[in-house]
Image (spheres, rainbow, N blue to C red):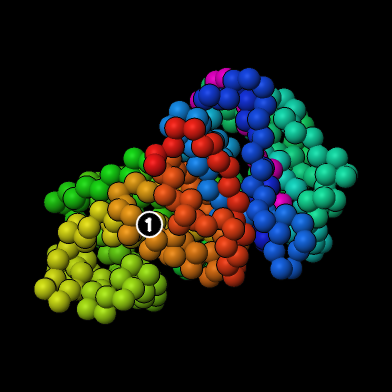
Amino acid sequence: MMDVQIADWKLLQLTVEGVGPFQNGPQTFSFSGEPTEDHSDPQPSNLYMLLAKNGYGKTTLLECVHGLFGLMADPVAGRFASPGPGCAQLDVRATWTIDGRTQTVVLSVWTGTQTPLVVWSSDDLEAAQASFWGKLGLESTHSGVSLFDDTDDLGRRLHRTILEARGAAPETLFGNDQDMPTVLFFPADRRLARPEDTRRVERPDGFVYQPAHCFASDGPEWGTTIDNLLVWLQWLDDGRLNELLDFVNARLFEGESRKTIRVPQRQVLLTYVSTSAGDHPLTDLSHGERALLQLYVRIACNMTSNTIVLIDEVEMHLHSNWMFRMFEGLKSLLRKIPALSIVFTTHNRELIRVFDHQLKEEGLVKGGYLIEDGLDR
């Protein structure tokens, strides 16, 4: 039975050294956003844009966040799965309840060095509105993953609880049944391929709790397709399929009253989109529609109540008009799920206007990091 409950999981900062282009000493990226109406000081952002030209380490930073939690996945996944050079530390703030006692803490998860890259003093904790510093150091070796000696009791308890929770199938959408942290990584290579001819009712790949997921290609293997996931939810027959389709249709086809994704056809195990011109399979959706469908469905089905979503090159497969629709969809997710945080990268300057960092919006705390030289115009 879990002895740790977590709420209000917020990114604070990421520090990297010796990974990718970050070879000249430790470099820290803050996830702070603008002050809100409720707080006069900068707050952790829940929508963060990393804007830089290719080769400046955007992807490396996302891979480091995913890789730190991938060290607790089964099997171990991500950038740090194999022993190698490089250090990274992610600091998050959360409210923890352990054995009936609740407190707000900063947790540091790190790898690549015996001791943390960044040490949190009492003054630092006070500035972060936390009362305690927890430490979890993870080391990948040829015989498995071990904990660094500087890991404290809080870190060990979280590590043990995450390992015990792995493999549990989600029972609700939007993480309502699971509060262990998870990272959902959507790499830039998000190919869209037609599913293979062999279709069957089987649990989709990755449809379990893991502290780190990576959702790349949708297909061609049946187990990785959205079709497979929708068929599986139909077979479970617990109400999730209709809830998911209502959520997706409202965001994907806003203003298109005659277009909707219907429940799968049992005879052929395929899902069809109903339009004014007739029905067609999901594979005939536009690249933009498919890209957004993958984001919405995977997030809704695989997130927990404490989730970090990482999207590399968010504009991939999207024309300009779809960027606006995508951002509105992501914003609606953040308003619906306050514990969710989304970090995305781009090298497209046009997204500065779409993101609109200065615009105050309900339920959003925006933050970002900008390198202007060499950006697409």
Using residue 69 as the reference point, say whether residue 293 is left or right of it: left
**Nearer the observer, 363 or 146:** 363
Q: Confirm whether residue 140 shows in the render.
A: yes
Residue 369 falls within the magenta-colored stretch: no
The residue shown at (57%, 62%) is 359
Q: Confirm whether residue 223 shows in the render.
A: no
Q: Which residues are magenta?
A: 81-93
The residue shown at (19%, 68%) is 272
Say few, some or many: other residues with alpha carbon within 10 Å of mark 1 (under 14 / 14 to 19 / 20 or more): many
Residue 90 falls within the magenta-colored stretch: yes
Secondary structure beneath dot 1 equals: helix
**Nearer the observer, 138 or 330:** 330
Q: Amino acid at mark 1?
A: Met
Q: Quadrant of the C terminus?
A: top left
Whether residue 334 is situated above or below residue 66 in the rendered picture: below
The residue shown at (53%, 70%) is 336
Q: Residue furthest front?
A: 377
Q: Position of residue 10 (x, y in %)?
A: 66, 54
Whether residue 377 is situated above or below residue 308 in the rendered picture: above
Using residue 142 as the reference point, say whether residue 33 is left or right of it: right
Q: Mark 1 sits on what residue?
A: 323
Whether residue 53 is situated above or below residue 94 in the rendered picture: above
